[in-house]
Amino acid sequence: MRISTRGEYGVRAMFDLSLHYGKGPIPLKSIAERQVISEHYLEQLMAALRKAGLVVSKRGAHGGYELAYAPAEIRIGDIIRVLEGPITPMECLDNGDGDGPYCGHSEQCVMRNLWKRLQDSMEEVLDNTTLESLRQDALRLKGDE
Amino acid sequence: MRISTRGEYGVRAMFDLSLHYGKGPIPLKSIAERQVISEHYLEQLMAALRKAGLVVSKRGAHGGYELAYAPAEIRIGDIIRVLEGPITPMECLDNGDGDGPYCGHSEQCVMRNLWKRLQDSMEEVLDNTTLESLRQDALRLKGDE
DNA sequence: TCAATTCCGAGTAGTTTCCTAGGAATTGAA
DNA sequence: TTCAATTCCTAGGAAACTACTCGGAATTGA
């Protein structure tokens, strides 16, 4: 039931980008330094996020990455799905058809309903939190200091 | 973000036991057959559940396992915690102290709050569902057929 | 005594995780 | 034109984890 470093680092990096949104491309190196993440590893995560269309990149000198949309448009769930795969506690919830080995048993449906409720509650949190809401949280926290 | 077969099988086995609650010990072999789970593997899971006090066992002929408490007393979260470890999307939420490498940064707290909300929503589902509620669901489903 | 059962520890193939390594391609600036 | 800064790409690899299997000892009721 853990989010791996892929998801964790990915969200941290995207949050970092959201703090620099509108200031042009941010080099991966600086993100990696601020967030204390292996540069080469983060590179792979950014590649996935780029292919998914969540960030855009610019190569060469003064290149880097920036968010493809405003922070308010990017949900944490979107990031997690790219880096960790579907948000689901159980595989059978994923492939629309109920083709697990035991599906069709009433018992199985009871289980499926349970896992579905869990999935829904997870997605509710992750899809109702955007990079912008995190940014607001951070501003508020800073103000409280 | 997946529950492994340990958690899945464990919940299925415990649900199976709840359907036979009060009828004396149920041999592991019959649970494994009904649930189509490897006997030896399930044995290991039951050992963990026994050590955690969720089931009691009886050895020898006519032995088997039964729930240590009434189905209404056993939460799915209890089972998952025994078999999968703490229900938490991020390790830093687990060890009470915030001793991760980045804790203390306001940024880190923003992340921590996010993961905490996710954890809470997961625990809410898992701890508000008991074996008894699953049993009721199953009865209702059966009645609808 | 025997068959059914739990209990226990070891081993293992395959997958996943979290990286590291090295270099090609692109770009802006001096 | 050159050079440094950057993204992009592929490959590899150690360690941990997952989902088991195997074999046998101990216990118990008939």
Image (spheres, coloured by chain):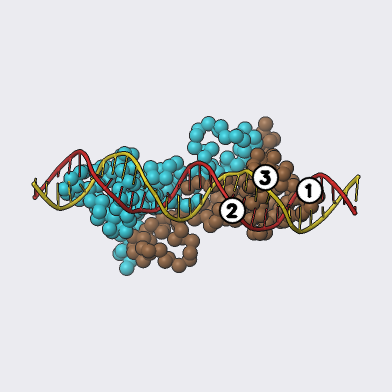
Chain colours: A brown, B cyan, C yellow, D red
Kind of residue indicated by mark 3: Glu
Q: What residue do we see at 57% from left, 35% from top?
A: B100
Q: Name the amino acid type tagged 1.
A: Lys
The chain containing the residue under callout 1 comes to: A
Q: Earlier in the sequence, mark 1 or mark 2?
A: 1
| Tags 1 and 2 both on a single chain | yes
Residue A104, quarter of picture: bottom left
Q: Earlier in the sequence, mark 3 or mark 2?
A: 3
Mark 2 — on which chain does it sit?
A
Residue B92: image location, x then y, percent: 54, 38
- In the drawing, what numbered circle is on residue A23? 1
Residue pointed to by mark 3: A39
Q: Residue D15, percent across and down?
A: 50, 41
Badge 2 density bin: few <14, some 14–19, many ≥20, Cα 10 Å: many
Dot 1 or dot 3: first in sequence order is 1
* Residue drawn at 35 percent across, 57 percent down: B137
* Residue A116 image point, x, y percent: 45, 57
Query: Residue at (68%, 56%) from the top-left corner?
Result: A50
Q: Quadrant of residue B33?
A: bottom left
Camera-nearest residue between A67 and B125? A67
Determine whether the residue tagged by mark 1 lies in a helix, strand or loop. loop
Compared with A73, A32 (above or below) is above
Q: Amino acid at mark 2?
A: Leu
How many numbered marks have been drawn onto this rendered protein structure? 3
* Mark seen at residue A83: 2
Chain of the residue displaying label 3 = A
Left or right of B86: which side holds A33? right
Q: Secondary structure at mark 2?
A: helix
